[in-house]
Each structure stands twice: as C-alpha cells, then as structure tokens.
Image (cartoon, grey):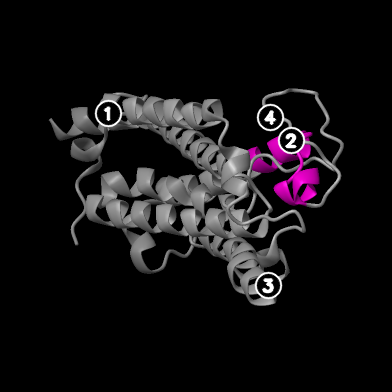
Amino acid sequence: MNRPSPISSFPSSPLGTPRLVGITLVLLLCVLAWDASGLDLAAAQVFGTPAGFPWRWSKQLSFWLHDVPRIGSWFVLAACFASIRWPVSVLRQLDRVERTQLALSALAAVLAVSLMKSHSKTSCPWDLQVFGGMARYVSHWAIGVADGGPGGCFPAGHASAAFAWFGGYFVFRRASPAVARRWLVVVLVMGSVFGIVQQMRGAHYLSHTLWTAWICWTVTFAIDAAVRFARRPAVRIAAKEAA
C-alpha cells in the first residue's frame, strides 16, 4: 500500500481537526453527565450483593481477562518501543517519528491514569459497606474526602491496558485511514470488555472506566497535536522544495 506523501497528508492545524476537538468535548460532556446521574452505585449493584461480588473470585475471569491482558499489554508496549528501530507488520506504514509517537503516547496514557490512581482516595465497589466491606460511598470528585476504605481506585487502571492505545488511531489516520478505523474499533471493544469485567468483579464503577477512556483519548490526542506542531517547519520546507 502506498502511503500519502507527508505534504498532502499532514493536517494544516496543529491542534487537529475541529471534528476531533468537538468529539473530545462531547465525550467529556457525556462522562460528566454520567457522573451527574449518580448511577454508579446502582450499576455496581447489578453484579454486587450484600455478601460481595461473586465474580470477584472467578479464577478464570481474573486470569484470562485481567492478568493476561495486563501483562500482555506491557509486552506489546515493549515490542512497540522495539519497533521504533525494527518495524514489523503494519507498523512499517509509519515513519520513525510516528512509531515513536505511538509507543510514547501509550506509555504516557498509562502513566497518567496510574498517577491519578496513586492520589485517589476513592475505594473500589468491593470495599463498600453495601457490598460487605467497610467503606461508604463517596464521589470521586469529593477531593480529599476519605471514604473509610483503602482508596486508590479511580480511575480504572485495567481498562487503560486497552484505551492507552488510542494513539494508534492518531498516527494511522494519516498513514492509513482504514487501519486507523480498525485500530480504533479494536481498542474500544477491548477497553469496554476490560471495563465490564472489572465492573463484574467489583473492582471499579462504570464511571472509572469512562474516565479512563477519556483521559487516554485526551492524552494521546494532545501528544499527536504536539508532534504535528513540532513537525510543521519540516513540512513547510518540504513543500517549498517540492514547489
């Protein structure tokens, strides 16, 4: 497949298309609307009981849809960094800068979620009194308010193993729009599955997964904007030389 020339495929705006900016803002409003609905606890009660979350103790669910994806994501990230020097498969469609962007944006998204979790006082659903734990329900936006549990549960870390790869959509939408669309679908499906599994196990509220998705999307979008801004002088020089 022949990729478009850097000059023709490079977006004119360093902040990305208005459409993507609009989508990002609409997604933010949707997540805020879910928070405002106060339905997190009701959604958790679909899988939780006063005795806890039965799916929490499923070894098969925990292993195949928690442990394996979590470890696998780190292997994929390591392979992605290796591909900066030795690209394989579809990554050959990207130039070196784009491959570097893909690897770094995934790492940055994971670190952003992890940093927020490390400072969160929000406990997991399985820690709540209503599900047999010791904590009381407190919104994750009640900054600095402890709920009586261990905290460290917001946003959803496991879902970031998939959502952190939103960066692939941004790099491939220039090199191969078809690959970009398929990449986006796979990331959304996998992130949703990981989020549902953690909801079933009582490890997270639905809002935790939604915020993780939005954070990862925004971080990778911002990095894409920064990379495109940094590359604009080179593109202008190339355009003059081609004129």
Q: Distance between the residues labelled 2 and 4?
A: 7 Å
Residue most extreme to the bottom: 60
Q: What residue did someone put label 2 on?
A: 137
Q: Position of residue 217 (x, y in %)?
A: 46, 39
Q: How far apart are marks 1 and 3 (CA)?
A: 42 Å
Q: Where is residue 122 in the image (x, y as percent from the top left)?
A: 75, 36
Viewer-nearest residue: 8 or 116: 116
Mark 2 and mark 3 lie on one chain; the one further toward the N terminus is 3
Q: How far apart are marks 1 and 4 (CA)?
A: 32 Å
Mark 1 and mark 3 lie on one chain; the one further toward the N terminus is 1
User: Start and end of the magenta stretch?
Assistant: 112-131
Q: What residue did someone put label 3 on?
A: 58
Three-letter amino acid code of the residue under disc 4: Ser
**Residue at the spot 83% in from the left edge and 49% down from the top edge:** 133
Q: For marks 1 and 2, give the one nearer the viewer.
A: 2
Three-letter amino acid code of the residue under disc 3: Ser
**Residue at the spot 24% in from the left edge and 49% down from the top edge:** 177
Element under disc 2: loop
Q: What residue did someone put label 4 on?
A: 139
Does 178 lie within the magenta span? no
Q: Disc number at residue 243?
A: none
Q: Where is residue 88 in the image (x, y as percent from the top left)?
A: 41, 68
Mark 3 and mark 4 lie on one chain; the one further toward the N terminus is 3
Q: What residue did someone put label 1 on?
A: 19
